[in-house]
Image (tube, grey):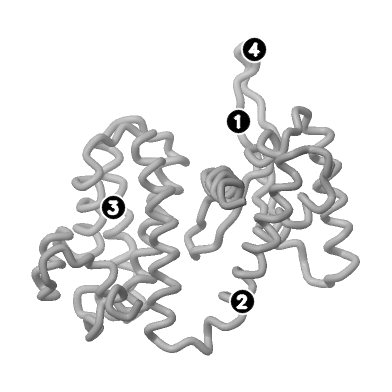
């Protein structure tokens, strides 16, 4: 049973994306083959059934099902655009509930999304009532997931030195400071993680940096390490400039919590 749980979590987590607000989503075209559907028409019918299921119990807009157009090159070398959807965790849950239960991955997906959707609902619903330390734990988990996706995107963009790549982003956001500079300024002990020693606001700044860099690397089809590092730096700097324009506190001026997240855990 434990082996099945790890197996499904890895498969569904591997195709998960995170937007600039820290929200998780899946692309329908990536979920389709995982659920053992080979034809878009058949899978699209399942999506339509999920939409009907949602409408019968909800009255709000289908903001969680935005349509996107993706360019492809046909066998004849012609560029065409295909329809895809960005799916929230909840709509993925409804999709697997309406999919063919005889398919092994559909059955496993039903278990995965049922459990994870419940966890997500609890996190979002209770966030405003959380203590500062609890918010830190929540945001730190978002960064962990975001960096996982960003690392994959960076490698696909030609990055070989991930440490230098991440430092480029920190330099842009922290006015030239590297991860090591941040570590020293915070007065941390050997092997302490700088992200474990940030407050919820500072973590939120970094979530935005991570998500926007991931999106821009993909959007611009970056294919070399130099450009990828430059993109990360520029995104970090632009976020810094936005904080300044809004009259916010620069990330390096935000207080370091008394206890690291490892101590709290």
Q: According to the image, label 3 marks what residue? A: 234
Label 2 vs label 3, nearer the camera: 2
Q: Is residue 131 left or right of residue 7?
A: left
Q: Closer to the N terminus: mark 2 or mark 1?
A: 1
Identify the element where label 2 is drawn: helix
At 60% from the left and 54% from the top, the residue drawn is: 25
The residue labelled by disc 4 is 75
Instruction: Work out whether mark 3 precedes mark 1 in sequence or the reverse, and give the earlier one.
Output: 1
Q: Which residue is mark 1?
A: 71
Residue sitting at the far top: 76
Give the mark, 2 or 4, whose residue is nearer the N terminus. Answer: 4
Which-is-in-front pick, marks 2 and 1?
2
In x, y percent, where is residue 135? 43, 80
- In the rendered view, tell whether residue 53 sits above or below residue 197: above
Q: Position of residue 216 (x, y in %)?
A: 42, 46
Q: Which residue is mark 2?
A: 122
Vertical position of residue 9 compared to residue 81: above or below: below
Whichever of labels 2 and 3 marks the residue nearer the N terminus, that label is: 2
């Amino acid at each position: 049973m434990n082996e099945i749980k790890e197996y499904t979590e890895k498969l569904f987590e591997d195709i998960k994306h995170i937007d600039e607000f820290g929200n998780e989503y899946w692309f329908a075209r990536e979920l389709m083959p995982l659920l053992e559907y080979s034809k878009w028409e058949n899978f699209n019918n399942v999506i339509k059934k999920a939409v009907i299921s949602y409408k019968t119990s909800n009255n709000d807009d289908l903001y969680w099902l935005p349509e996107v157009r993706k360019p492809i090159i046909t066998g004849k070398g012609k560029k065409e655009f295909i329809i895809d959807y960005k799916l929230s965790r909840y709509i993925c849950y409804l999709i697997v509930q309406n999919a063919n239960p005889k398919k092994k991955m559909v059955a496993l997906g039903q278990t995965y999304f049922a459990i994870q959707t419940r966890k997500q609902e609890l996190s979002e619903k209770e966030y405003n009532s959380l203590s500062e330390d609890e918010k830190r734990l929540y945001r730190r988990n978002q960064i962990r997931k975001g960096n996982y996706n960003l690392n994959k995107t960076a490698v696909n963009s030609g990055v070989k030195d991930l440490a230098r790549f991440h430092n480029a982003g920190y330099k842009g956001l922290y006015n030239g400071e590297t991860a090591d500079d941040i570590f020293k300024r915070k007065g941390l002990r050997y092997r302490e993680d700088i992200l474990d020693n940030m407050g919820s606001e500072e973590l939120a700044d970094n979530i935005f940096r991570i998500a926007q860099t991931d999106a821009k690397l993909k959007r611009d089809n970056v294919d070399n390490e130099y450009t990828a590092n430059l993109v990360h730096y520029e995104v970090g700097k632009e976020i810094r400039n936005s904080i300044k324009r809004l009259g916010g506190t620069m990330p390096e001026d935000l207080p370091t919590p008394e206890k690291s997240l490892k101590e709290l855990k």
